[in-house]
Image (spheres, rainbow, N blue to C red):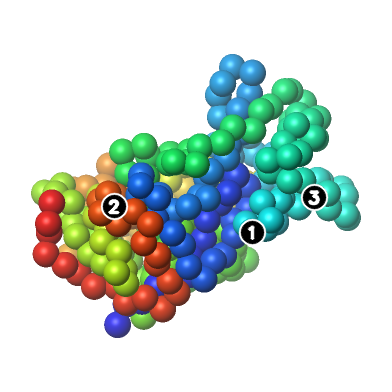
Amino acid sequence: MPYLAKIFIYPIKSLDGVELEQGRVLASGALEHDREFALFDEKSKVVNGKRYSSIHQLHSQFSIPQRTISLQLPGQESTTVFHLDQERQALTNILSDFFGFAVTLQQNSVVGFPDDLKSPGPTIISTATLTEVASWFPDVTVDEMRRRMRANLEIGGVPAFWEDQLFSESGDLLSFRIGDVQFFGVNPCQRCVVPTRDSRSGEAYSNFQKIFIQKRQATLPQWVASSRFKHFYSLSVNTQLPSSETGKLIKIGDKVEFTLDLN
């Protein structure tokens, strides 16, 4: 029986994640506090892992209740704690020094800063998928692959690539539920350069994308709507949530069930 095994949010886009026991759905369909903050440069361009591999060297821990970040810079053993509201300027000063150019920390509590504005719901993957994909790369653990893929929801009790059934051949939204919350599966998530790098150092794994594409195509289940793949460097599923789900909670252990398409 498919069930919700893990929940992750990433309070500051491209920094470390936080594992939760439950998550609250916002009106946008995003999870509360996920990608709530993002760094921007002086040209209002986002400062993220796609553009700056050095960001992997920033190690952070978040306290959601206290709204703080504990930040460890490269070469430092100690961490510095900043309040995300009251000490935002001090935090951006430290980060500006790290990057070598001025950055600002912007906040969007409504939808956050997702890569896919049309499908801002939680991204979904299965534990078995992460295990399988990690096996393609010697010395890459399941936890490391998890940090590279940065999905929000992890499904247990299913085989690898189970989540590939959460989108349809026709492109119509596919309805399913996690606990009491209705989701619409949209499409497979196209990956960027970030998974090719070590999540802690930013060091690139040689031929990662080439190996991934070959293995992904070779292991693609026969029942998958393969026409929905623009390329096979894709993993996890993008989602949308109807406005009726605003304020509802998803919790570890919730069952995952397919429902009639109400769209």
Q: Nearer the viewer, mark 3 or mark 1?
A: 1
Pointer 3 or 1: first along the chain: 1
Residue 199, visible in the rendered structure: no
The secondary element bearing badge 2 is classed as: loop
Q: Quadrant of residue 127?
A: bottom left
Q: Nearer the viewer, mark 2 or mark 1?
A: 1
Identified at 52% across, 71% down, the residue is 21
Q: Residues within 10 Å of mark 1 (few under 14, many from 20)?
A: few
Mark 3–mark 1 contact, CB under 8 Å? no
The secondary element bearing badge 1 is classed as: loop
Residue on which the image places disc 1:
65
**How far apart are the alpha carbons under marks 2 and 3?**
34 Å
Residue on which the image places disc 2:
241
**How far apart are the alpha carbons under marks 2 and 1?**
25 Å
Residue type pointed to by label 1: Pro
Identified at 34% across, 53% down, the residue is 246
Q: Quadrant of the N terminus?
A: bottom left
Identified at 62% across, 57% down, the residue is 64
Q: Quadrant of residue 100?
A: top right
Residue on which the image places disc 3:
81
Nearest to the observer: residue 177 or residue 96: 177
Pointer 2 or 1: first along the chain: 1
